[in-house]
Amino acid sequence: MALQDKGAERRPDGTPEPCTTTPTTAVAIADERGVITGWSEEARSLLGYVPGEVVSRPAADLLVSHLPPSALRRLAEQAPWYGVVPARHRDGRTVDVVVRACPCPDGDGRTQWVLTAAVPDGPSLPGEDKGTLLRELTLSQLPVAVAFYDRDNRAVGANDVIARIVGLPEERIRGRRLMDFLPSPAYDEFTELQDQVVRTGEPVHVVRYLRAPSESRGRAWSVFLSPLKNHLGQVQGSSIALLDITEQYLARQRLLLVNEAGNRIGSTLDITRTAQELADVVVPRLADYASVDLLEFVHRGEEPPDGPPRGPISMCRTARQAGTDALLGTMLRLGSKVEYPASAPTAECLATGRSAVYEVNGSSMLRWAAQDPQRATRILLSGAHSVMVVPMRARGVTLGSVFLGRTRHPEAFEEDDVLLADEITARAAVCIDNARRYTRERITAVTLQRSLLPMTLPSQPAVEAASRYLPAGGRAGVGGDWFDVIPLSGARVALVVGDVVGHGVQASATMGRLRTAVRTLADIDLPPDELLTHLDDVVIRLSSEAAADADIAGDIGATCLYAVYDPVSRRCRLARAGHPPPVVVTPDGEAAFLDLPASPPLGLGGLPFEACEVELPEGSLLALYTDGLIEARGHEIDERLGALRRTLARPAQALDTLCDDVLATLLPAPPDDDIALLVARTRALGADQVATWSLPSEPVVVAQARRQATDQLTAWGLDESAFVTELVVSELVTNAIRYGRPPIQLRLIHDGSLICEVSDAGSTSPHLRRARSFDEGGRGLLLVAQFAWHWGTRHAAQGKTIWAEIPLAA
């Protein structure tokens, strides 16, 4: 072992003091050549040799190994030296003894050496030498790398651990700066820290992950740089101590990676994004490249098949990540279909449900390569030397696999790496399974909602209409927004937009029930404010049913805007229940929000709804929408309303193009809430399409009414429909005279169909009944119902109107 030297004692005049020893210490004399010339009795007791066996022999013959270089250097300089050396006993065993060599010059200019020896823990060792020896033994045997430097940062001494780390013996380290034997830029920082410690006298502690020149892999080192001060507190140099904390460091890095995975993976309910987050987390800290393959049922949001997958497996490449573009080029593209034969490592791991590590030249990989040479070529091109396959399972369901490879990492995957990959993959698997379940529910809700929304807008003469519906993106899911276009009697049309509070299947189902209720109420031609009152009762009843069901959370609420437009009068009557106001764009391009009375949302009960009526010139634009179009995080509502108004005011030939422009302007990203948009351009029926007559309440007027209707049909070129029209007019006018109250009015409307309307001031509604064979009346409405496509009654503030839509002859 290499120990520090101790200087020789000297007289006041500077000459060496002759060496002395205690009588119990073994003594031997050697000449300047190292040949033994004297041997004491204590020496014989220590090593067993008698003087005749050792005198005239080199002292080195008694040593088991050569002296350390530091000892040889001291002896060559004729300087005292002491240290522990292994000596050979006469009986063949090795005895560790403390040897002290003191030079003793004689008068002839030659130097003799006095050699004293004792066992290290023997009582004959002087106290000063024992303390120094123990310090030297501690320094040399300490498992911590230690080196000492002077004020110029030149090495004064180092223990064997330092020498082993840097790959140089101590004598080649001594006298050199750190940068001289560790020229890598990674170690430049320590030279600066040495200067700082010497300058300030304050210790410094850092932790660094470095690769020593003598080692093939890096290690984590806890580095302590300390100043060395004399009894006056003056800095005489510095020391560096390095403690290997690789295991603790790697364990901490694994915990940090697991924590990071928990924070980064599963930020959304999107399957592809979650898989990509998993790949991004493990590269490059665990692997140099990673790919995530998912079974096809995951993307479709379907229920998994029974049992683990076996045999050839087909999966979809969902995510990939690599540290370099060159590695990425060897990997399959996203969305590619991946086929794994039964012998492939991935198929084996999915069948067993356990992770496995494979060497590229291992038997399993070679067997796979024989069946899938193209994939094997990709792995070889990547330069991987170790790969790992991790099954992705959650709640007992196999979802896919993660394939990890190492190229630049010199170490192969170890057991700790497998445990870490299992933990991260398990967390990602739960997130992906949640996304799968969400996808299934979302598909169900979207399918339900789209089945409840109108597939196409009905053809009617009042307006030209276009619509758009967008489900919410992200975690919100499908909501309860809806729209509808409902043809009404008298060539009128109802425009409806509504929004059910909440998201998911429950909101979609509620939306379907409300849309059905609106259509039912529209069929009886209720005014908008009365219709909303009845719809409010429906929502209250649904809320009561939901409150009694423990599986339904929260109250049911909704908003709605209902508008009725009459192309004959060009007037539109509207009412809203907690809904945003519509936008009206006049033919000259001026856009404004319609000032409708603000009424409460549906479901509160006991509060009235108010309606207003406006006249819309032909060609006016009416835009109805839900709040998802104008509400967005990070944007002021006034800003969004202004953008909507400006976009609608732009000239657009096609309403579909206008709808697309609105969505593109207000929705640069997927919406946070459902969006329903309904845009209608008004039409007007000309005077030549409508004929109106006021009739006296006298029976003789029936014939006159039939004649006037026939003449009008002749003017319209509808002579072939005259017979049915005369019959309908005769019956409706007769009923108005017999059961109604004056004034009586007859109106014919022609626009693709023929509508006959008879109005009177009475409130009694006629109804169908089955007449008996001997009854003289009761068959009029039955005949009307047989000859007309549709017929019905609508009430006004005063009186009613009986109408019938008559089919035209081909």
Image: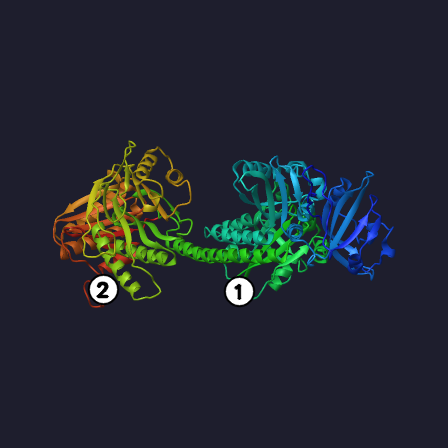
Dot 1 or dot 2, earlier in sequence: 1
Question: Disc 1 or disc 2, which is closer to the eye?
Answer: 1
Q: Secondary structure at mark 2?
A: loop
Label total for image:
2
Is residue 744 shown left or right of residue 175? left
Quarter of the image holding residue 226? Answer: top right
> What's the distance in space between the residues labelled 1 and 2, CA to CA?
65 Å
Image coordinates for residue 650, horizontal then vertical, percent: 34, 33
Image coordinates for residue 615, horizontal then vertical, percent: 22, 39
Residue 455 visible in the picture = yes
> What residue is rendered at 84% in x and 48% in y?
35
126 or 421: which is nearer to us? 126
Residue 220 is labelled as none
90 or 222: which is nearer to us? 90
Residue 682 visible in the picture = no
Q: Secondary structure at mark 1?
A: loop
Is residue 128 shown left or right of residue 549? right
For label 1, count other residues whose C-alpha is less than 10 Å away and answer few (under 14), some (14-19) or many (20+): few
Residue 396 is labelled as 1
Identify residue type, mark 1. Answer: Gly
657 or 779: which is nearer to us? 657
> What residue is rendered at 38% in x and 47% in y?
672
Is residue 763 shown left or right of residue 290? left
Residue 769 is labelled as 2
Image coordinates for residue 218, horizontal then vertical, percent: 63, 47
For label 2, count other residues whose C-alpha is less than 10 Å away and answer few (under 14), some (14-19) or many (20+): few
350 or 385: which is nearer to us? 385
For the rendered model, the colour scheme is: rainbow
Identify residue type, mark 2. Answer: Arg
